[in-house]
Amino acid sequence: MSQLKEAILSTTAKGDKAFIPYIMAGDGGLEKLQPTILKLQELGVTAIEVGIPFTDPVADGPTIERAGERALANGTTLRKVIETLTSFSEHIKVPLVAMTYLNPILAYGIEKFSEDAKLAGIKGIIIPDMPLEERDIVYTALKANDIALVQLVSLTSTPERIERLTKASEGFIYAVTVNGITGARSSFASKLEEHFKKIQEYSDTPVLAGFGISTPEHVKSFSDFSSGVIVGSKIVDSLVANDWATIEELVKASKVATVK
């Protein structure tokens, strides 16, 4: 079992739900990466998704797109992010999940990236522009370094596609909750609970909800039928504003065992 999956199951075994905040590495400068990660783990998050800025992102809404542009303007690269994480890896106590694209990994070198990512504390990876059919490009190297390859499942995926994706996903299954780009939303489509149950039928890997989740109420609502949530745009906006109170409230909402 991957360390990422183990961390999520350990959280749900306590009666809580997994909470994974998304941060954009390099937004505000790479020097902010260490204090941000250490503060988030202090608040009790299950894992942290570390976004790598890219010139041609997939599905990013305005908030994350702007954060990526700021990070790129600061000279942030995949290699620099890995180097920065490695510099304080002994202080990282929660699994890190890298969110990057295939081209930067190929430019880095798949085996070298996988080896360096392990040293940096990365336990999982999301590659949104790499289809399932191409996973063998990176899978062997990632597996050798105990890095889980997380798959995204969309609302429009067919049952056959859902089955293939869920059985291939490691660490957790990233269930996209909207049709469209990332970003805070006030409401979601109906029948999401039914969709999540369908996803969970094919695998015992935890299913986490992501895209659009931005309030404590959203966190609690999705906790009723998932193993946890990923929160991106709201976290990014809150970090820019240095609004840790909002982030803390979001994390607290996932602590079902103590909230009820």
Image: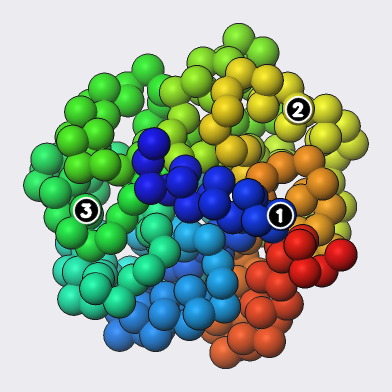
Q: Amino acid at mark 1?
A: Gly
Q: Residue at x 44, y 23 (%)?
A: 168
In the picture as drawn, the residue positioned furthest to the front comes out as 14
Badge 1 element: loop
Q: Which residue is mark 1?
A: 15
Q: Residue at x 46, y 30 (%)?
A: 169
Color encoding of the figure: rainbow
Badge 2 element: helix
Q: Amino acid at mark 2?
A: Lys
- Residue 176 coordinates in the image, percent (x, y): 64, 40
Q: Left or right: 113 with respect to 3?
A: left
Q: CA distance from mark 2 to mark 1?
A: 19 Å
Mark on residue 197?
2
Q: Residue at x 68, y 20 (%)?
A: 201
Q: Residues within 10 Å of mark 3 (few under 14, many from 20)?
A: many
Q: Residues within 10 Å of mark 2 (few under 14, many from 20)?
A: few
